Image: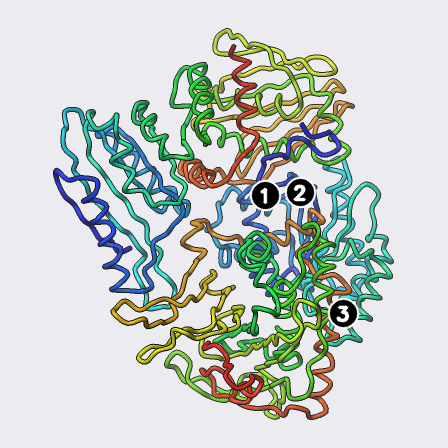
Amino acid sequence: MEHAVWAAQDTTAPQIEAALRAMLAERHAADAAYVPARVLNLVLVVDREWRGEVLNRLERVGRHHPSRTILCAVEPGRTTLDARVTTTAPARSGEAAPAVAQERVEIACGPGHIPHLDTIVDPLVVTDLATVVWCPHGHEEARRALLRLAQVVLIDSLDEPDPRAAIAQARRLAEEAYVVDLAWLRTTPWRERVSAAFDPPRRRGELGRIDAVTVRHRADSVVSALLLLGWLASRLGWEPGAIAGVDGVLAGRARTRRGEVALRLEPDRGQDVPGLAGLTIETASGTALALDRGRGGLRARRRSADGRERRWTVLGASRGEPGILGEGIRQALLRDPTYRPALEAAGRMLA
Amino acid sequence: MATLEENPLTEGLERLPVPPTTMTIFGGTGDLARRKLLPAIYNLAHEGALPEQFNLVGISRGDLSDDAYRELAREAIRAFSRRPPDGAVLDALLARVRHVRGSFDDPAVYERVEACASAWDEEAGMPLDRLYYLAIAPSFFPAVVALLGERGMHRRPGAEVRVVIEKPFGTSLAEARTLNRRVHEVLEERQVFRIDHYLGKETVQNLLALRFANGMLEPLWNRNYIDHVQITAAEDIGIGSRAGYYDRSGALRDLVQNHLLQLLTLLCMEPPIAFTADEIRDEKVKVLHAIEPPQPGHTVRAQYTAGVVGGERVPGYLEEEGVPPDSRTETYAALRLEVENWRWAGVPIYLRTGKRLARKVTEIAVRLKPVPHMGFLSEGAVGPQPNEIVMTIQPNEGVSISLAAKIPGTRMRIRPVKMEFLYGTAFMSQSPEAYERLLLDAMRGDATLFTRADEAEAQWAICDPVLQAWAEGADPLAHYPAGTAGPAAADALMPPGTRWRAI
């Protein structure tokens, strides 16, 4: 990779913007095959001391990297702006292929800059590209300021230890922007597999006879489990009631047209990555489907009405946390109509 | 909320469910299986895109145990997958792979395949869909389909049976018709998936998005604004180890009859009333039916001679290993066609393809008519040029539009500039291999990106008369040095003032 760097202390947003523009012009003049990527603007607000950790996470998202990243590192006591602009492009091998470049703007700022952070960031975003805001360390005031520029807010509801507060915050943000929630994306493979399991016409009717759902999750990933239940409820027309818990196990019921569904969320102490560990869906006709994490994919078990059990592996590689973040960035350009209804249903379970 | 007839859980999911399937590859150890199919299957498995239950049988003449075939598949996936395989996923996939040894015309082979598949049905507790992939020489297609029929393997209660047939689909119109008849004696058309992997490419599918999702282009997309169209599929490589196939086929059969005509139909078709398989293919077939076979003098065929490609000397076609020294097979073909309908009448469409040309590029260039009054033409500048919309399929996928712009300075001088959209800059994701998309579509029974029987025949109806005329000596074989843009004779297809685009 080839890097070009510009840095300045005690600078201003217009100076940073001018430097960025000059760098792009210089690189293009030197090599016409150099073209900046134009996918989306990702604006991050982070604590200064965790800046490196967040950058490492971004480095590992691979091909789903945003085209322009603007990272605002908040440093207590700082009153001036320092900036560093880096453009990165693959080293050219003499071929005619274009060298697609990414840009990163790092700004060191202080708490006093936060209320008007939008006026600092505004000149630096690429106009007409989607702008995504991500504040992994809180910085609610900064997020509020930046919402004026952003179409999408990236969150990870698992960052908030209190599930009730996490769901409430996600609902609030969803009123103002399109929300991409990493806690929701951790449920994607599970939703795909549940959908596929009931897709054959002979099995589709069982969706109306579901009478119990258990979701197993890492202890700190209740929100992902709630969102999965919320998804089932909103897609299948269930009316979920409040859930309550003892010893970390949450339980409740949802009303359906035919009766009730027992809902249960169980922490799995053996699960070492955030997200879900497994789920079991049982029906009134005696059938059951269980999916659990396993080697090379999900271990599936299906019990038929006669009690016979079949096991197999549903193939698939784990995306890992970098993959989840990369997927979050990619999803910023898509629109999932099922998240908000799932979120609302999850909210009702915590009411 | 969707009704239960629809599966309400699929809403919002990017990956639609694929029915549980047992796939059988005829030609399980061949080049196509090793380089494309097995890696594509692995990548689908890696992404969790395969059906929840998936099994694979590879058929070949090789004396291979199941384990030996699994090892062959593992090596092929390691060598040709677009991502390094994950050991656990690969192991889990290969555990569901078996090998059946034998010849494609041996009924016992079908018995063994059926035994494997039935065992998997039993294990799953339900009949799984069957997908038979014919990655074999076309001469075997009729026998394989007939044997599937004789053994009763072409239909299954409660499950679907589908057959994927690789190109070339016949070598002439008569053969294609015969083949379609033989196939339809056993299978319904909805069970048949004639694959042209070009249609699985993202950029080819983007042609439809570009045309029908942009209000800007469609008003221009007709004879009133378009001067001509050039469709190019140039390769810088020779025939490699494919002399046996290529010398019987030639450039017209290899690329024009399928890939280039497919691109032409997508470019020229009317908007379908819905983006469903048959609605789209109906419109494509109408375009093919509107094309008269080219007249004598409107085709060029040529063969490459020794030359220099990328600074290295390369042999001529006749010196390539396996090519008969007196071969008359064309390695270059160019045609001038017209789509004789209301939208396109009078717009020449030029197709060209060739081996050992200056560069590898596949593109469609749509040249608009010049502005009616050249008021800006002045000394010292190129002046306004007709706008050109270029859709590059490979290698640098994207779309460019040439516009006239003022050269900075005190005088009103104009030159063309390019407005360019590159896939790599706007979508930071890696496109899946065409075979991945097409395999999933075939398992789901979505034939949109596959060639229908009448479409294949209509393609041959355009190319067959050309082949016959060439066989009778029309448009004699020209020659071009390897590493060039092709034969000079191709320039004569164009009217004065029009040129081929630089390759």
Q: Are marks 1 and 2 on the same chain?
A: yes
Residue A302, given in percent of the width and then of the height, sits at 68, 28
Q: Are marks 3 and 2 on the same chain?
A: yes
Mark 1 / mark 2, whichever is N-terminal: 2
Residue B437, given in percent of the width and then of the height, sits at 60, 52
Q: Element at badge 2?
A: loop
Q: Using the rendered image of the protein, determine whether residue B83 is visible from the camera's viewpoint.
A: yes
Amino acid type at mark 1: Ala
Q: Which mark is residue B49?
A: 1
Image quadrant where residue B335 sits: bottom right
- Given the image, what chain letter belongs to the residue carrying mark 2? B
Amino acid type at mark 2: Val
Mark 3 / mark 2, whichever is N-terminal: 2
Outermost residue on the left side: it is A10
Q: Residue at x 61, y 60 (%)?
A: B199
Cβ atoms under marks 1 and 2 closer than 8 Å: yes
Q: Which mark is residue B18?
A: 2
- Given the image, what chain letter belongs to the residue carrying mark 1? B
Q: Using the rendered image of the protein, determine whether residue B317 is visible from the camera's viewpoint.
A: no
- Given the image, what chain letter belongs to the residue carrying mark 3? B
Give the CA distance from mark 3 to mark 2: 30 Å
Q: Which mark is residue B457?
A: 3
Q: Element at badge 1?
A: loop
Q: Vertically, is B458 above or below B117? A: below
Give the CA distance from mark 1 to mark 2: 8 Å
Q: Mark 1: give few (<14), some (14-19) or many (20+) Cα within 10 Å.
A: many
Q: Element at badge 3?
A: helix
